[in-house]
Amino acid sequence: MFIAPVEGGFETYLAAGIQQKKVPVVVVGSRDKADFEISAVAESEKAGWAKMLFARSANSMEEAGIKITNIKTDEVVFAYAVHKSNSARGKQSAAEACAKHMKEKIEGQ
């Protein structure tokens, strides 16, 4: 499985999430060596001063989505979107949520 580069470096978090959640796939560094490709989008919004002052929280808002495509057939075999409104671990939390649901799909849960 190849993870396409994502603006902001989310692909690194996604690769780490795949390892952390023990998703049964092999991530390769070259699209030419992969059967599937993960493309993703991710957006982070840091806590503003009002949230930090009144809610006493510096947690961010994270949104991410992934799509897994069979490279040979161009078929989308999996897609998932996550919204974390109060994320203490930022992009890491969103990436791990994507990996968790990918693992569940692969294992047929």
Image: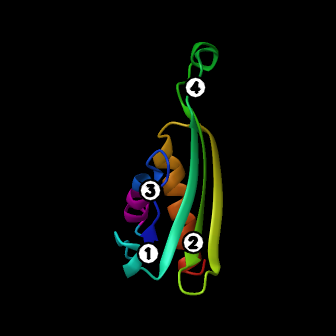
- The answer to whether residue 24 is left or right of residue 46 is left
Asked if residue 33 is positioned above or below residue 62 in the image, the reply reads below
Say the numbered circle drawn on residue 11: 3
Residue 1 numbered tag: 1
Dot 2 and dot 1 residues touching (CB under 8 Å): yes
Query: Which residue is more in the foreground, 100 or 33?
Result: 33
Of the numbered discs 2 and 1, the one sitting upstream in the chain is 1
Q: Residue type at mark 4: give it.
A: Ala
- Whichever of labels 3 and 2 marks the residue nearer the N terminus, that label is 3
Amino acid at dot 3:
Glu
Q: Which mark is residue 105?
A: none
Q: Is residue 14 left or right of residue 87?
A: left
The image quarter containing residue 14 is bottom left
Secondary structure type for disc 4: loop
Whole-Å distance between the Cαs marked 3 and 2?
Answer: 13 Å
Q: CA distance from mark 2 to mark 4?
A: 31 Å
- Foreground of the two, 102 or 76: 76
Q: Secondary structure at mark 1?
A: loop
Q: Earlier in the sequence, mark 3 or mark 4?
A: 3
